[in-house]
Image (tube, helix red, strand yellow):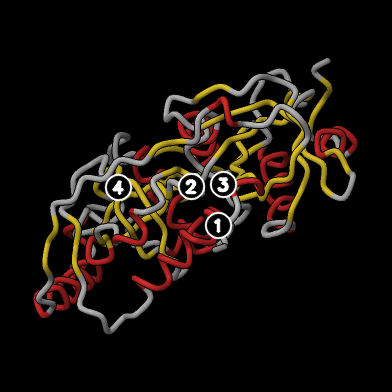
Amino acid sequence: MSSDFDLEDEVEEVREMLYDILKKAGAQGIEATELAKEYDKQFVECGIGQPLPSAWLRYIKVADEFDMRHEGDKIYISVIQRDNVPIQEKVASIVKEALSKDDEEVVDQDVKLQPLPLSSMPQAKTKVHILAATDPSNISIRLCSWDPMPDYLYQALAKDFSDENKKRKRIKTVEGRICVAKLPNGSWERVQIIKPSVTMGHKGYWVVFAVDVGVFHLAHEKYLQPLSEGVCAIDKLLLAKCQLAGIKPNNETGIWSRNAQQAINNWLSDVQGTEVELEPVSEWTASKEAVPTVKARILVDGTDLSKKLIDNGYAQSSD
């Protein structure tokens, strides 16, 4: 299973979402603290984005598309006009040249994937794999009882897409379409095409949602390929979502603090790839994306993560 806590992926996703906020603010930009609050409100609270990394301002400082200026003790961030960033034009030219050398077939494929039915989801304690986490209310999981379907899927992806010398086909890029993408960490995943990238000025880059792991990435259209016959054979989405039960944010805002978000992300990244216990305490429901979702306790080596968050001062009991 590929790592979805990869720093490079996280930084790219954060840049994409911050750019989306800043482009609406004009040349004046937004003060850094207010920008962080707006990011949490628009992306983290609703489960779209990862929490801002602790060094996010450093990443913004070195990014070509942002301008950072100091006014007294405050930092303001704005978007640089693209006409003034020749390095991006150079990168775009290189990409265009590389694509023109590839005699690729563009395939108009429209495949539908189905989530596993709610009636099949467990009511008793079960084993799961952790895939990703943005906060205690948004944890992506995969049930161990779904084995060996994930193995079949990733074996098919490796077999059909890992050979870089194989003649490529590209999917016709249509928003909402399911295809296969090579992600920045080098892994191949089934993804849904969401929208053109704004941080890259599009230039062939798209925001995609990895449908089997529940996170967003950037991918160039040259790496968006139609599903192979082997991958199409697995027509189920291998993703569920969990909200930790019995806790709430340890503040009056009802919003998870950045420390709480980072803590749960770090704890769960440490056990990624191993089995942990999930104990549902509510009925399974379908999210707006039709992903099975449940309130539950998660136990890692017998330790209740809800209790661990309370004990470390990141949460309080909701009972």
Label 3 vs label 2: CA separation?
Answer: 14 Å
Quadrant where the image shows the C terminus: top right
What percent of the width, then of the height, locates residue 79? 32, 48
Q: Earlier in the sequence, mark 2 or mark 1?
A: 1
Secondary structure of the residue carrying tag 2 is strand
Q: Residue at x 82, y 47 (%)?
A: 300
Residue identified by numbered label 4 = 178
Task: For marks 3 and 1, give the one nearer the viewer.
Answer: 1
What percent of the width, then of the height, locates residue 123? 71, 27
Amino acid type, residue under disc 3 in the picture: Leu
Label 4 vs label 3: CA separation?
Answer: 28 Å
Residue identified by numbered label 1 = 4
Kindly check if marks 2 and 1 are in contact, taking CB atoms under 8 A apart as contact.
Answer: yes
Amino acid type, residue under disc 1 in the picture: Asp
How crowded pointer 3 is (Cα within 10 Å; few <14, some 14-19, many 20+) is rated as: many
Task: For marks 2 and 4, give the one nearer the viewer.
Answer: 4
Residue identified by numbered label 3 = 52
Residue identified by numbered label 2 = 215
